[in-house]
Amino acid sequence: MNSAYNHLADPDQVAKMVKLLKIDVKRLFAEAYLSWFGTEATQEEITEHIKSYQNKSTVPFWLRQHIRALKKQREATRKNLWEKRIIAAVCSLPYLIYIYIIYTFGMTYALCLGIMA
């Protein structure tokens, strides 16, 4: 994938992240600016970048980087949740085997009583 295609896809990535996080574009820009530069941007700076994004579909490098970091963070969280689910399933497996054995012996006992009666 060449860099021209990546830059054309950037506005879509911004829109997806805004929708995913359920925040407005202004807040995403402000968070990205703060994350990259370490200081809060003025309203005028944010508005200027948003206008450039809306009119020319240009996405600042610091916003691109922030979106990548958010995606990585969400993927790591998703992976951790999946691992926890697997661990929970494995931990409950002995209990399920115990229930199965008790059920099987119970059914066998019931069938034996039925045959003997």
Image (spheres, grey):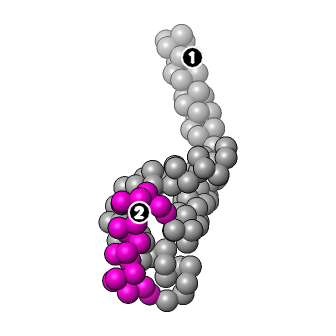
| Residues marked 1 and 2 touching at CB (< 8 Å) | no
Front residue of this view, candidates 1 and 105: 1
**Front tag of 1 and 2:** 2
Front residue of this view, candidates 101 and 29: 29
The N terminus: image quadrant: top right
User: In this image, 30 relative to 35: left or right?
Assistant: left
Mark 2 is surrounded, within 10 Å at the Cα level, by few (under 14), some (14 to 19) or many (20 or more) other residues, namely some
Q: Measured from the top left, where is residue 102 in percent x and y?
A: 58, 35
Q: Which residues are magenta?
A: 40-59
Image point (45%, 50%), residue name: 12
Q: Measured from the top left, where is residue 81 in percent x and y?
A: 57, 55
Image point (53%, 16%), residue name: 111
**Residue under numbered circle 2:** 53
User: In this image, 100 relative to 28: left or right?
Assistant: right
Q: Earlier in the sequence, mark 1 or mark 2?
A: 2
**Residue under numbered circle 1:** 112
Question: Would residue 92 be seen by someone viewing this image from the given angle?
Answer: no
How far apart are labels 1 and 2 at the CA level? Answer: 77 Å
Q: Examine the structure image and report whether residue 69 is included in the region drawn in magenta.
A: no
Specify the amino acid type for callout 1. Cys
Q: For numbered disc 2, what is the local secondary structure? A: helix
Q: For numbered disc 1, what is the local secondary structure? A: helix
